[in-house]
Image: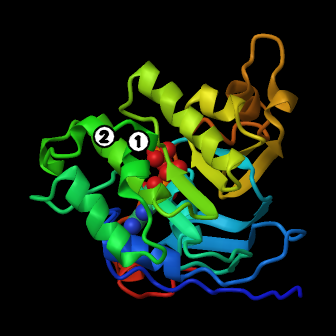
Amino acid sequence: MTTSDSTQRTADPTGTDSQSPPEQARADETSTEVSDARTPLLTVDGVSRSFGDLRVLDDVSFVVERSSVVALAGPNGSGKSTLLRIVAGLTENGGTVTLAASGPRRVGYLPQSPAFRPGFTVDETLSFYAALLPGDPSVEAALERVGLSAARDRRVEDLSGGMRRLLGLAQASLGDPALLLLDEPTSDLDPRMTAHVFAVVDELAAAGASVVLATHDPRGVDRSDVAMLLADGRIVARGPPAEFRDGDHDALAGLFEAAPGGAVTEAGVAPMVGAAARQAEGDEVGGDGR
Ligand SMILES: Nc1ncnc2c1ncn2[C@@H]1O[C@H](COP(=O)(O)OP(=O)(O)OP(=O)(O)O)[C@@H](O)[C@H]1O
């Protein structure tokens, strides 16, 4: 039977990017359980978000098909992280986000700067989180998947930046979620590890997951099924990467070129002073922010 429902996202009381188990657990909880192989896995409809007088997302709509990899590119400050946090249910928006997924875990989220509880080892971190998830997901498999098995007894505060990112990826993929939201998963990683992470992304998609990948890495865009460019608060270009390769342009450069004139040469910043700054602060603790 086809069912459909929409989840209006609620305010993020923390305003942080930490990947504490409760925050990640909230990402799991926010999805609406709908399952039909013919419907897109994810439908984002009319999503808007402002911080004070800065309109970061303006009526953004797109779908993500099942078992597909979507690369989300865009200039610094264009709102990629904000959009992923909205889809994960971690911050409010003025539209609807519908996830047509069933199964024990529906959303896994890797923040741009994953943070973990100090004092825990890698193994303890994942085991603690696995215990919160249904279905007893394998910590061993998650460690092996990202290549962190040898570091399992190291404390999280002793990990390198790249290793922390891999641990975040292991945590996000624990329990094989239907949708993975990965915010720049390869920044801080050496070329070999970058290739490994993209191979993990391919593996997850081949196993049936969909992955939305915010990235500045041309290789991430190249291997996606669909590339999207976010600029000026909107999706300004979208299509298979091959559509954007042209002459010397790789798909990422071509995607930026495809944006309407001048839209992508500025970082997404706007002066926020006085009342606007205070309003932005208020948004994070419960203002409507739409
Ligand atoms: N909590 C907040 N309060 C005020 N402004 C914010 C907040 N979070 C994000 N912004 C602003 O929203 C805009 C979009 O930020 P976001 O982090 O989503 O961009 P991004 O595309 O992920 O950038 P980058 O590629 O540099 O990581 C930026 O101008 C940023 O300063």
Q: Which residue appears at 43% of the width and 50% of the height? A: 141
**Residue that lies at the very extreme toward the left in this rendered image:** 119
Whether tag 2 and tag 1 are in contact, CB under 8 A, the answer is yes
Q: Quadrant of residue 25?
A: bottom left
Q: Label 2, label 1: how many angstroms apart (C-alpha)?
A: 6 Å
Q: Quadrant of the C terminus?
A: bottom right
Q: Where is residue 47 drawn, in percent x and y? A: 68, 72
Reading the image, the residue beneath label 2 is: 149
Q: Is residue 167 left or right of residue 42?
A: left
Q: Where is residue 283 drawn, in percent x and y? A: 42, 80
Q: Where is residue 159 drawn, in percent x and y? A: 19, 40
Say few, some or many: other residues with alpha carbon within 10 Å of mark 2 (under 14 / 14 to 19 / 20 or more).
Answer: some
Q: Is mark 2 within 8 Å of ligand 1?
A: no
Q: Which residue appears at 55% of the width and 72% of the height? A: 105
Q: Where is residue 169 drawn, in percent x and y? A: 43, 49
Above or below: residue 119 compared with residue 275: above
Which of 284 and 91 lies nearest the eye of the viewer? 91
Indicate the amino acid at tag 1. Answer: Glu
Reading the image, the residue beneath label 1 is: 144
Say few, some or many: other residues with alpha carbon within 10 Å of mark 1 (under 14 / 14 to 19 / 20 or more).
Answer: few
Q: Is there any visible trace of residue 228 in the rendered image?
A: yes
Indicate the amino acid at tag 2. Answer: Ser
Which of 194 and 144 lies nearest the eye of the viewer? 144
